[in-house]
Amino acid sequence: MRVTDLQRLYDYSYWANRKLFGVLAQLTPEQFTRPVAGSYESVRSTLVHVLSAEWGWLDRCGGPPRGERLKAADFPTLESLLEVWDRVERQMRAFLSALTDEDLARTIEFALGDGTKHSVPLGDLMHHAAIHAAHHRGQVALLLRMLGFVPGNFDLLLYVEEKPSATSG
């Protein structure tokens, strides 16, 4: 894995997020926060989980500190969430642009919520965070369908077609 691979993966992830955010903007505040289904129940709670996790992994890997896990109640509207999301995206892009390929092998030690300690290469943690976001983006798409919205298609193939330079590197 190279830094350029991670940059491409995150670029795709942020592209897909923007596609999804366009549909999310159609939700009423009640639809945004309504319990629907899934591990996090609402669109808002699922999105806050994704953002909190991404920022948490960035923090563990040496990026800007997140502090405590983000709470859904602190984001009453989509706009309030997107404001923080934009900041974290800028931080992630800056972090990735400062990495070298050698940095990706650096071991990051961390503990999860249950206290279990882990040691994983930085590159694998950053890869995990992007895949984690894709997993939950799919869940949000399902929640949108359950609320009567069409989330659209944000497959990687569409990203590649839209951004041909993304395939080089």
Image (cartoon, rainbow, N blue to C red):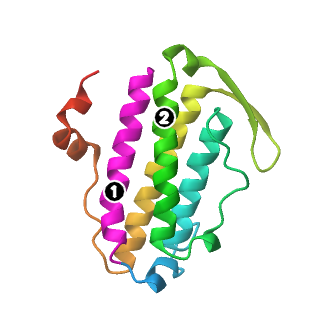
Q: Is residue 24 magenta?
A: yes
Amino acid on which the number 2 mark rests in the picture: Ala
Look at 30% across and 76% down and name the residue there.
Answer: 149
Q: Where is 155 relative to 128, above or below?
A: below
Name above or below for residue 40 compared with residue 53: below
User: What residue range appears in magenta?
Assistant: 1-26
Tell me which amino acid carries mark 1. Answer: Arg
> Quadrant location of the N terminus?
top left
Across and down, in percent, residue 76 comes to 55, 76
**SS assignment at label 1:** helix
Alpha-carbon distance for marks 2 and 1?
19 Å
**Residue 57: x and y, percent?**
62, 41
For residue 79, what is the image quadrant? bottom left
Residue 153 in the magenta stretch? The answer is no
Q: Residues within 10 Å of mark 2 (few under 14, many from 20)?
A: few
| Residue 115 placement, left or right of 26 | right
Q: Quadrant of residue 124?
A: top right
Q: Which residue is found at the position 48% from the left and 30% from the top?
A: 96
Q: Is residue 110 above or below residue 79?
A: above
Overall secondary structure of the magenta section: helix
Where does label 2 land, which residue? Answer: 94
Q: Nearer the viewer, residue 126 or 86?
A: 86
Specify few, some or many for label 1: CA neighbours under 10 Å numbering under 14, 14-19, or 20 or more: some
- Sequence-earlier tag: 2 or 1: 1
Q: Which residue is mark 1?
A: 18
